[in-house]
Image (cartoon, rainbow, N blue to C red):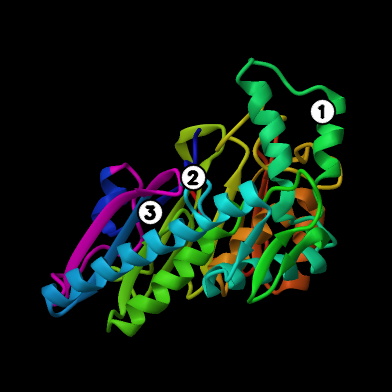
Amino acid sequence: MKRRNFVCAALGAASLAAAGWPLAGAARGASPLQWRERTLLGFGTVLSLRVAHADSQQAERALDQAVATLRHVEAQMSLFNSDSALSRLNREGVLLRPNPDLVRVLQLAQFVSARSRGAFDVTVQPLWTVFEQASRRQALPLPEAVKAARAAVGWQHLEVSNDAVRLARPGMGVTLNGIAQGFAADLVRTRLQASGIAHALVNAGEWTALGRPAHSGPWLLGLQDPRDAEALLARLALDGRSIAVSADNECSFSADRVHHHIFDPHTGYSPAELACVAVAAPSCALADALTKVMFVAGREGAIKLAKEWNVDVLVVDKQGKWQATPGLKLQTG
């Protein structure tokens, strides 16, 4: 599985310069802050944290807490962990006394599902399963298998309360791969602030930041071409909002990337028009979920929906043509 290969972080002026991508605003002398970093595996990908504090020991303690927060979210929401609360829900059909954070993310998911008329739906796990099983045979699932899997999809049949989470239909399954990383980034950001951290970059599979990097400019993300890992489409400034990106090359079930890990819940197949979507939103969890809504909407629909959701988007179609809403702070060329 290939994940999160569309975004690279501009951790500082030297980082992208070393990769051949010059940044506006070179470093202007050493910062009095002590920068510390962690890299770890989580959610099936590589995660990274970078924080600054005048006290290096405080920076390290904050990183310890951030890592613990990521592990907590994994223990609740990751399907890569067979013992997670979410994995148990899918096996047993019910989860009693769910963790409050799991309830929060499921409630947000249900809100996005309702407002998007089901374009985002965490109950698409049966579709993932049928495509993944077919891919092991180097094939695509038969239409009848997709139809049967789609019959088990429906966010309205996911019951969420503080007392229990229930799958109300046989064959249902939940995946939070489309929102949990964003939720984790939000939670880490909040806890870093509570630890006295004013400057940080959080990569939990999606991206959020505090303050500024060591150099004089803003935090920048290099948005890679989904068809050429060596090329950047643009550099995107984190302007106080969070960024989430989904692309059809993260996990594909066919060499032409027509079939991939993002599903239109209404059809059971992947949306046909777009190759990549980036969303900038106040909440990283919301940005994460909305990348799937925008994928389903297509190029023109995503541009219109951005205004309705009060977010900004960048969309790339299958031919490599891209378009962004005016609110994104982009550097190109």
The residue singled out by tag 2 in the image is 82
Q: Is residue 227 magenta?
A: no
Give the mark nearest the N terminus, 1 or 3. Answer: 3
Rendering coords of residue 256 (x, y %): 67, 23
Task: Kindly identify the amino acid type of the residue bearing the numbered disc 3.
Answer: Ala
Which SS does the magenta portion mostly show? loop
Within 10 Å of disc 1 (Cα), the crowding (few <14, some 14-19, many 20+) is some
User: Which residues, given as a range, are shown in magenta?
Assistant: 19-46
Q: Nearer the viewer, mark 1 or mark 2?
A: 2
Q: Secondary structure at mark 1?
A: helix
The residue singled out by tag 3 in the image is 9
Measuring 65% from the left and 55% from the top, which residue is drawn there?
291
The residue singled out by tag 1 in the image is 145
Q: Give me the C-alpha separation between circle 1 and circle 2.
A: 25 Å
Q: Give me the C-alpha separation between circle 3 and circle 2.
A: 30 Å
Give the mark nearest the N terminus, 3 or 2. Answer: 3
Measuring 47% from the left and 37% from the top, which residue is drawn there?
231
In the image, 162 versus 195, the foreground residue is 162
User: Does residue 279 appear in this view?
Assistant: no
Label disc, if present, on residue 52 of the rendered structure: none
